[in-house]
Image: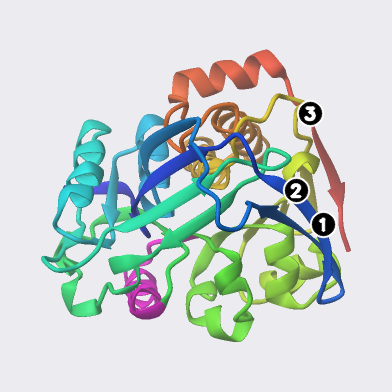
Amino acid sequence: MNSDVICVGSSSVDVFVQTPFAAHLRRWKSGKVKDFQAYPVGSKILIDSLLFSTGGGGTNTAVALSRLGLKTAFLGKMGAGANAFAVSHELKREKVNSLAVCKKGGRTGYSIILDSVGHDRTILTAKGSNNDLQPDEIPWRKLRTSWFYFSSMLGRSFQAQKKIAQFAAKKKVPIAYNISDYLAKKGVHVLKPILQHTTIFILNREEALLLTGKRTPEEAFKLLNGLGIKYVVITDGQHGATAYHDHRSYHINADRIKVVETTGAGDAFAASFLAGMIKTKDIVFALKLAKENAESVIQHHGAKNLLLSWKEAVRMVERNKSKVAIRNIG
C-alpha cells in the first residue's frame, strides 16, 4: 500500500506521574541558570495520579498525520511483549499501517514523565530497542510513500535513517526531519548525510543554535539553507514559531492558554506543519494549523489524546484567525 507519509522514529509507553511534592530549585551550572525538580532523599512519596499512554516521536507524528487525513505508516523497532502490543494496538486503532520491527528479547521504549514545574516536564526515558533498528531489518520493498518523516533516533537507528535518506534521494521522495537536543549536540557535520536530503527541517530555538553554533535563528537558517534545506521551522515555546523559506520569515505568536503538560507538543506541531504543506502548499496556513494542534495537545495529559482531525484543526484556524507576520530577510 502506498503511503502519503512514512514516519521513521521511536515508540514508547509513557507513564505520567503526579505527586503532591516536587521542589523547584534554581542553580547556576556551566555558566547558565538551570531549573531542577527535586524530591526528598530517602522518602516514600505517594502518587496523586498515574496515567498510561503511548508516545515516541515516530508514533506521535504518525497518529497526528493520520487524524489529519493522510495515509500514514510507522517504521521503528520495539520488543515483542505487552508494551509492544499496546503500541501496535493503538496504531491499528488510529489507522496507521505498522512497518515496525518487533524482536523477541528486545525492549519497547518506556518513559516516565514527572509532574511539571512551571508547566514543563522532566522525562526519564529508556530507549530500549528504539536505538537498534538495522538496515537489514527494514522492509525496503514496502517503503512506497510520497514523503518520509524522520523523528530523532540514535545509535544504529540513526545509521539506518541515513540509509533511508539515501534511498529517499534515489526515489526523489522528500524528507521532513525533526531532531532532539541529543542530535543537535552532535553538530551539523554528523547530521549532514540526512540534512542534505531534507526538505522541511523542524526544531526548537535551543536546538537550532546548538546544532549550528550560530547566535540567532536567522543565522542558523542561512547555514541550513546552504545545505539545500528549503524550509526551516524554529519553534520557541510561548514566543511562538518562525518558518524560514527563500528570503522570507513567517512568524506566528502563541496564544495565552492554560498549559497542563507539554509532552508531544513538538510532534503535533511538526506533523501538522507537514500536513498543511502537503495538502495546501501554503506556508502561512501550515503554520496556523501547526499552532492550533500543538496548543490542543498541551492543554491535556498525553501526547495523542487531544490531537485534532483535519476538520477540527481547520475550524480552529478559521475561528482564531491568528496572524502571521511576514518579513524579508537578507
Q: Does 7 sit above or below residue 94?
A: below
Identify which residue, 81 or 250, lies in the foreground: 81
Query: Extreme front residue here?
Result: 42
Counting residues from the N terminus, which is met first, the one under dot 3 or under dot 2? 2
Q: Does 265 sit above or below residue 25?
A: above
Could you tell me residue 124's position as x and y percent? 49, 58
**The quadrant where residue 169 appears:** bottom left
Residue visible at 42% across and 45% down?
A: 61
Q: Does 309 sit above or below residue 282?
A: above
Residue type, numbered disc 2: His
Alpha carbon separation for disc pair 3 and 2: 35 Å
Residue visible at 25% across and 45% down?
A: 87
Residue type, numbered disc 1: Arg
Q: Is residue 163 left or right of residue 283?
A: left
Circle number at residue 24: 2
**The quadrant where residue 325 appears:** top right
Q: Are marks 3 and 2 in contact (CB under 8 Å)?
A: no
Q: Are marks 1 and 2 in contact (CB under 8 Å)?
A: yes
Residue type, numbered disc 3: Lys
Q: Is residue 207 left or right of residue 78?
A: right
Could you tell me residue 14's position as x and y percent? 40, 46
Residue visible at 39% across and 79% down?
A: 155
Check the picture and name the quadrant holding the C terminus. bottom right
Give the SS element for disc 1: strand
Could you tell me if residue 268 is visible in this image? yes
Identify which residue, 68 or 118, lies in the foreground: 118
In the rendered image, residue 158 lying in the magenta stretch gets the answer: yes
- Mark 3 = which residue? 323
Circle number at residue 26: 1
Magenta range is 155-176
Give the SS element for disc 2: strand
